[in-house]
Image (tube, rainbow, N blue to C red):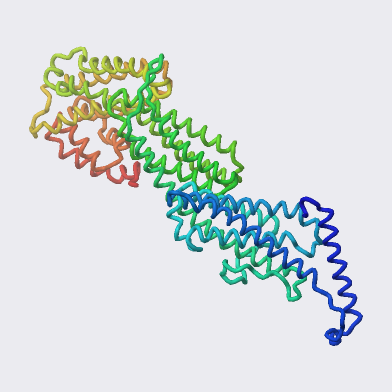
Amino acid sequence: LALNNPAGMVALVEAVEVYERANDQYKSLHDENDMPNQTLHFTDMRAAALSQIYQDFELRGLEVFRGVHMQQADTAEEDQGLNAQFTSVLRAATELVAEIEVVQSDIAPCFPPHWAIEVLWSACVAHVCSNQIIQQIGGPDGHALPDLTVTQLLDLVAWIEFFRETVEEMFPAVAELHATQKAADFETKPDLFASSGKEVDMDTATDNLAWVNNMLWEVHRLAQEEFLVRTRTQSEEWLQSVYEGDHSKYQSKEGRLTTSLCEDVFSVAAVQLTTIRERLSKKSDALVMAICLVFSMMRSKQIHARNGFLQDLETCCAASNDFSRMSEKCEEVLQDLFDECEFTEDAIATLEASSNELLSIYSADAVYAAQSVHVYIFEPIRREIGEELFGEDWEQNCTHNELATTLTKTLEDFLGDLEQYVDEFMLKKAVDSLVSASVVFYVRCLLECAEKHRNNKDSYFTSNRKALERMSGDIKVMRRYFDGLVEDMPALRKVIEKEFEILTTMHELMSIAAAVTNSDASDFILVMHKRIQDIDLTKHAVGDLWHLVNPTQERAVWELVESMEDTLLAVCPPD
């Protein structure tokens, strides 16, 4: 009546109020003790009306849910029937909660404020909806929550947030009541009326709404925990399948190598994030937690799976490009979420921190993959010259440093491939690694010779002076090649200076050991230790250099390093 004929509703309510005033006036004219002897008796119309309205409101809510249960009663498949029933219950509950605003805006104005119609309706909705939902989830402790699907858990979380927001917006006092006087009985309709029955006891009503609100928020916590556990498991399974699956391989017109890994990973993530975003409100804390969880699982999987993509030169290049694109895609996904949702500043900060961790992993792995090409570039180099380097033929016949030239020519050939396979930025990172790898390869071959040298009296080389000349020439050939790349890669100069310092230092120490130069070994030992940063390793490395060219003084140089321990520790303190 209030919706279809508000004027009629107002007139009816006013008639009840007139009747109540007449009743009050009559009672004021007669002594209360004399009332039983009076022949004229008034019915408590307002109390009766409020009681009837309260009952009708409850019946309205029950009727909505009764229709839901009857509709699902004949469902053929039991599991599907239960799932559909839960979804329908939430839909019905959403409809009833949404009508709280309708009652407040369209119905309550037809009644005097002291009738508190919106309170009666809200109390009925809270009672009926909470009762139905608690039954669906197996009681207040949520014993049946594990039986719900992820989508149903999301819907449950979203509905409770909708209920909480609606109730607390309409009744601000409810938000402040975290502890209530109401007993934990969600099955019995609360008695909201004062002793006279003519008005709503607002303290009792507020307490009741707060109790339901707090009880449902505990259900929200349980559902949210179950949902996050389920999301973690689902993410892990989906990402495992994606990372272990076959990925389409592509090569662009420019020669860039990629695979479908980026698209495959983010399509899975998009399914999860879209489902979560569509089911939860745009302000939901659960939405933020779920997004962070998905990002965390993507990060964890990337950390564990990265090396599996680095099988050869081409897969390293493709992986580098894929990881770079994944980093860019991560930024796009986050921006889309910001555009579509209404996050608080704290939520935005949390999401940015989580996404930055994922983005950092992708970016770092892209660089790592590009730099990993050195492993596969130096495999053929080691097979070709590894055994010959520092051998007798190298010492006696490689007057033009042919082996070092072979190394640089091989690097040049591979660099031509890298220029096609990866972008300019990653190419520079790959070349950085080739500088380091060249130095490591040369040092490793030299120290392996020291390991093979079993003579404690004579030099490994036929002529120390000639061997040192060959080393000096080799170093110049390798450095000249990399210096030639500096014009296009200016930042490479610092890398060259840093990496080749160890070679020149080792050459100088060997020259001192062979008495070719009179420099102070302590100065160069200090330089070498700054790179090695471990006293024992420094001592063994220096000892090996002496063992190669002057084995009889190996013990003496060990003692020299040991005597420098305080200085070395001061230069590079232990962690």
Please, is residue 156 above or below residue 353 in the view? below
Left or right? Give the position of 24 relative to 195: right
Residue closer to the observer: 124 or 181: 124
Residue 574 visible, this angle: yes
Of residue 271 and residue 176, the one placed in the foreground of this image is 271
Percent position (x, y) of residue 479? Answer: 31, 19
| Relative height, residue 275 to residue 416 (above, below) | below
Asked which quadrant contains residue 318, the reply is top left
Whole-percent x and y of residue 316? 33, 26
Left-right relation of 519 to 10? left
**Of 217 and 303, which appears nearest the observer?**
217
Q: Residue at x 73, y 76 (%)?
A: 195
Q: 518 or 214, which lies in front?
A: 214
Q: Residue at x 27, y 22 (%)?
A: 377
Q: Residue 457: name its quadrant.
A: top left
At x 53%, y 56%, the residue is 220
- Residue 167 in the image, given as x and y percentages of width and height: 66, 57
- List the single residue furthest toward the right: 29
Quarter holding residue 337: top right
Measured as percent of width and height from the top left, residue 257 is found at 37, 21
Quadrant for the N terminus, please: bottom right
The residue sitting at 42% across, 16% down in the picture is: 488
Q: Is residue 565 above or below residue 457?
A: below
